[in-house]
Image (cartoon, helix red, strand yellow):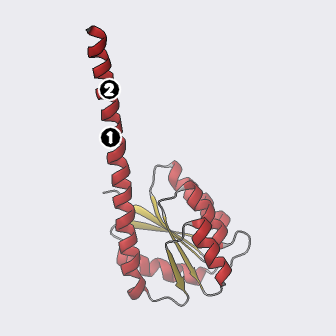
């Protein structure tokens, strides 16, 4: 299977580097990990990956960043890629921000800084499996719908010959 992408967005470079190192330890065989230092840069990265046919499976973002905040970013990601796993990793988000991310951004996981990758990697792994199952289900459904259309056309053709 082709590698999926995990996108990490935080305005603190040290946080990004630590997160990348930890994610690659657990998910490096199945995922590429890309970094962005702002919400705007993250959105541009996601759009670039999508335009090249890549699969953005996980987006992990901080809440408090200059410009686009984490909950706003997740809302935009949710509009573009509703199935993508969205994780808010933050030390400063308030309850309202978390609720907004859940309600409007389709938040899958809320993690407070400092995080423990040993604990959250199981949740992320479970979410990735669910994501991949959903993608496969959608693929199979599209194949089934195409086959139904083919059969309907064949039935119409047979009926028109009678």
Q: Give the number of the disc on residue 3.
A: none
| Res. 93 visible in picture | no
Q: Is residue 86 left or right of residue 65?
A: left
Across and down, in percent, residue 41 comes to: 64, 64
**Which residue shows up at 32% across the image and 40% down it?**
143
**Which residue shows up at 43% across the image and 81% down it?**
22
Q: Which residue in the protein does label 2 denote?
A: 152
Could you say whether the residue bearing mark 1 is in a helix, strand or loop?
A: helix
Looking at marks 1 and 2 on the same chain, the residue that comes earlier in the sequence is marked by 1
Q: Which residue in the protein does label 1 denote?
A: 143
**Which residue shows up at 73% across the image and 74% down it?**
66
Across and down, in percent, residue 110 comes to: 53, 80
Reply above or below: 16 against 147.
below
Across and down, in percent, residue 39 comes to: 65, 68
| Residue positioned most to the right | 67
Could you say whether the residue bearing mark 2 is in a helix, strand or loop?
A: helix
> Could you tell me which quadrant the N terminus lies in?
bottom left
Q: Is residue 134 left or right of residue 60?
A: left
Residue 149: which quarter of the image? top left
Q: Nearer the viewer, residue 40 or 83?
A: 83
> Could you tell me which quadrant the C terminus lies in?
top left
**Which residue shows up at 62% across the image and 58% down it?**
44
Reply above or below: 17 against 155.
below
Q: Nearer the viewer, residue 127 or 116?
A: 127
| Residue positioned most to the top | 162
What distance separates the C-alpha of mark 1 from that of mark 2? 14 Å
| Res. 15 visible in picture | yes
Closer to the eye: label 1 or 2: 2
Reply above or below: 3 against 36.
above
């Amino acid at each position: 299977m082709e590698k999926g992408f995990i996108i990490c967005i935080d305005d603190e470079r040290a946080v990004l580097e630590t997160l990348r190192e930890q994610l690659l330890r657990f998910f490096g065989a199945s995922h590429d990990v890309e970094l962005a230092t702002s919400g705007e840069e993250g959105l541009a990265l996601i759009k670039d990956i999508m335009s090249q046919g890549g699969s953005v499976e996980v987006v992990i973002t901080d809440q408090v960043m200059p410009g686009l905040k984490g909950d706003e970013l997740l809302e935009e990601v949710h509009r573009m890629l509703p199935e993508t796993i969205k994780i808010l990793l933050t030390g400063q988000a308030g309850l309202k921000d978390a609720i907004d991310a859940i309600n409007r951004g389709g938040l899958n996981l809320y993690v407070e800084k400092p995080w423990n990758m040993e604990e959250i990697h199981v949740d992320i792994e479970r979410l990735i499996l669910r994501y991949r199952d959903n993608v496969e289900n959608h693929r199979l459904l599209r194949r089934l719908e195409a086959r139904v259309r083919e059969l309907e056309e064949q039935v119409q053709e047979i009926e028109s010959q009678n």
